[in-house]
Amino acid sequence: MKREHMKLERTNEKGERKGRGRAFGKACAASCQKVLTQISAAKAAIFTESHQVLREQEHLLRLALNEAEAVAGQTLYPQLLFPALAREKVQALITWEARQQAVRRASPIFAARA
């Protein structure tokens, strides 16, 4: 008599099938990687377009983009929120830098330091 082997799926303590859990985990990891890739591409594009204006403030530009990424990462759809939030932070930085330059030009004390 031939012995037939049945392929049994193992279950965890909750009775869930492990094979399906692994597939779900791989799908989640792939989805997360896709989101991270989208954010990285947007971050690089925004950096490139903003770097000309904020050449002297590159460090602050990077900090603003990192902050936007961190805030967007706390939402359900970070890849959708990040570009708008990053542009908003970059615009605030551009406004701040313009104000700093105006203050330096208007005040002889600050102009001497620049």
Image (spheres, grey):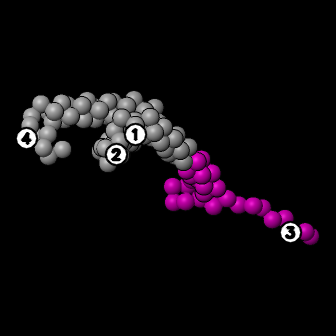
CB within 8 Å, label 3 to label 4 = no
* Foreground pick, 12 / 63: 63
Looking at marks 1 and 2 on the same chain, the residue that comes earlier in the sequence is marked by 1
Span colored in magenta: 1-30
Looking at marks 4 and 1 on the same chain, the residue that comes earlier in the sequence is marked by 1
- Which residue corresponds to mark 1? 51
In this rendering, position of residue 101 left or right of residue 5: left
* Foreground pick, 73 / 40: 40
**Residue type, mark 3 in image:** Arg
x and y percentages locating residue 89 in the rendered image: 31, 34
Q: In whole angstroms, how far apart are the C-alphas of marks 1 and 2?
A: 7 Å
Q: In whole angstroms, how far apart are the C-alphas of marks 4 and 1?
A: 28 Å
- Which residue corresponds to mark 3? 3
Quadrant of residue 34 within the rendered picture: top right
- Which residue corresponds to mark 4? 109
**Residue type, mark 2 in image:** Glu
- Which residue corresponds to mark 2? 58
Closest to the camera, between mark 3 and mark 4, is: 4
